[in-house]
Amino acid sequence: MKKTYFISDLHLSETQPELTALFLDFMQNLAPTAEAVYILGDLFDFWIGDDEQSSLITQVKNAIKQITAQGVACYFIHGNRDFLIGKRFAKETGMTLLPDYHIINLYGVPTLLCHGDTLCIDDVKYQQFRQKVHQKWRQWLFLHFPLKVRLKIAEKIRAKSRKDKAHKADEMMDVNLPFTLTKMQQCNVPLLIHGHTHREAIHHYEDKQRIVLGDWRTDYASILVAEENGEMGFLK
């Protein structure tokens, strides 16, 4: 039976090898059984450019390349941590980059996919920051800095993000529901799948359904599977 996997918010980094192990296990044992794998952002905890190299990056690239070489389609939507993953990474892995909002036909169900950060409009400061860092000229400038400079900038941004997050209300960091339902209405879809908020759940709203992918932890991998027969749920 055909099936498709959805994952997000792994936040892979050199400091948490347990998460990398979970991801590699998924890619080696589950991903090859699917027809497609969708990674909805924040695969990495931070990404400073396709020219960065490390053992972690090599492992991840090889894992993705192995499944795409086997005929499993792998799609990626940028997250708020790894929005600089570019064409070079995609070419080296066989992965397909998707826009911020993307509609697929999921076994007969029109489905909207996104990372989820664009739905959190109540966090005004973040949305202003996001608008700035997604400007093409700023990205071009950043990517032309030496790697060491980019690493220092990235660490400052991470530190500021941790500090800001500690002072934000939980509601502010969640999606704005009226805005989200309106987006679904505009896209004419009954199903939305996203990540970002780290609040794994399946929500029902009359004729609509919203599935939130969870973040990955050392003892749990949040993996949504959709099957050809219409069955859908998180692997336990």
Image (spheres, rainbow, N blue to C red):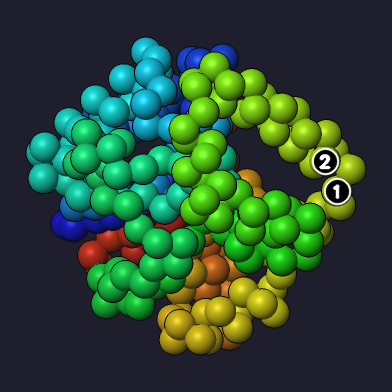
Residue assigned mark 1: 168
Please say whether residue 236 is visible from this viewpoint. Answer: no
Observer-nearest residue: 9 or 137? 137
Q: Are the two marked residues, 2 and 1, in contact with CB atoms closer than 8 angstroms?
A: yes
Dot 1, crowdedness within 10 Å: few (<14), some or many (≥20)?
A: few
Which SS class for mark 1?
A: loop
Residue found at x 48% / y 69%: 192
Q: Quadrant of the N terminus?
A: bottom left
Position of residue 53 measured from the top left corner of the image (x, y, whole percent): 38, 18
Residue found at x 29% / y 28%: 61
Distance from label 2 to label 1 (Cα)?
A: 7 Å
Residue 201 vertical placement versus 152 (above, below): below
Which SS class for mark 2?
A: helix
Position of residue 11 measured from the top left corner of the image (x, y, whole percent): 53, 33
Relative to 26, is 128 on the left or the right?
right
Residue 106 vertical placement versus 135 (above, below): below
Dot 2, crowdedness within 10 Å: few (<14), some or many (≥20)?
A: few
Please say whether residue 198 is visible from this viewpoint. Answer: yes
Q: What residue type is disc 1 on?
A: Lys
Observer-nearest residue: 61 or 126? 126
Look at discs 2 and 1 and give the one toward the viewer. Answer: 2
Q: Residue 107 carries which label?
A: none
Residue 48 vertical placement versus 229 (above, below): above
Residue found at x 36% / y 49%: 76
Position of residue 112 measured from the top left corner of the image (x, y, whole percent): 43, 70
Relative to 201, is 174 on the left or the right?
right
Residue found at x 20% / y 50%: 73
Relative to 57, is 129 on the left or the right?
right
Q: What residue type is disc 2 on?
A: Asp
Residue assigned mark 2: 164
Total residue callouts: 2
Relative to 76, is 220 on the left or the right?
right
